[in-house]
Amino acid sequence: MEVEKTGEMKQELSIPEGFQEGMNLRVSGSNIEFNAYQPLVRRALDAVGVGCRYFEEPHQYSNVQDAAKYVRLDRQASGPVHVRDGPLVQLAHLLENDRPGYRKLVQNNADEHGNELPGYYHTVTLDPDRIREAWPAHHLPKEIKHN
């Protein structure tokens, strides 16, 4: 199998030792519980005649590139999420100069056409340590956004 990496063809695919056979899969969903994807993928593959055995027990090197959960807030209950002292900015303050780790805060009120739209794209990204400060039971990094 030939592998292309940064525009250059390589002759050999790097495969972990002992790895027999695998499949790359990209799945997009909306408002599905994270742990429901694996059984759903098995059912979908089985329905189109692809051996669902590939997804019975994922290989230890399997990974998830991105997962999203969408939530709609009641405006009257939440107040303005994207304001200067709102929840997104408060989450960004979980990581200040006195603590190591990663955080990113983006506050963009202009769309791709230059139109000013308050709260157009506001996001905060927190690493696993900082996310545990907000939600102790969580262990994966999170991006929380308003757009």
Image (cartoon, helix red, strand yellow):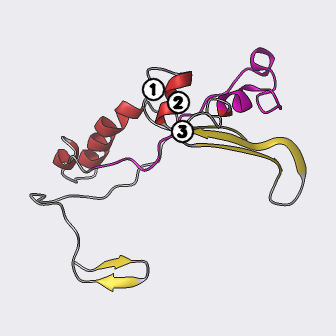
Q: Are marks 2 and 1 in contact (CB under 8 Å)?
A: yes
Q: Nearer the viewer, residue 136 or 30?
A: 136
Which residue position holds label 3? Answer: 100
| Residue ranking furthest to the top | 77
| Residue ranking furthest to the front | 98
Could you tell me the amino acid type at mark 2?
A: Ile
Image location of residue 129, percent across then percent down = 48, 32
Mark 2 vs mark 3: in front: 3
Q: Name the residue at 13% across, 58% down.
A: 19
Q: Are marks 1 and 3 in contact (CB under 8 Å)?
A: no
Could you tell me the amino acid type at mark 1?
A: His
Q: Quadrant of residue 98?
A: top right
Which residue position holds label 2? Answer: 131
- Crowdedness of circle 3 by 10 Å Cα count: few (<14), some, many (20+)? few
Residue 17 is one of the magenta-drawn residues: no
Answer above or below: position of 14 versus 101: below
Image location of residue 112, percent across then percent down = 80, 59
Q: Are marks 2 and 3 in contact (CB under 8 Å)?
A: no
Instruction: Choose the circle earlier in sequence order: 2 or 3.
Output: 3
Measure the alpha-carbon separation of dots 1 and 3: 18 Å
Instruction: Choose the circle earlier in sequence order: 2 or 1.
Output: 2
Could you tell me the amino acid type at mark 3?
A: Pro
Q: Secondary structure at mark 2?
A: helix
- What kind of secondary structure does the magenta stretch mostly adopt? loop
Which residue position holds label 1? Answer: 138
Mark 1 vs mark 3: in front: 3
Measure the alpha-carbon separation of dots 2 and 3: 13 Å
Q: Which residues are magenta?
A: 62-91
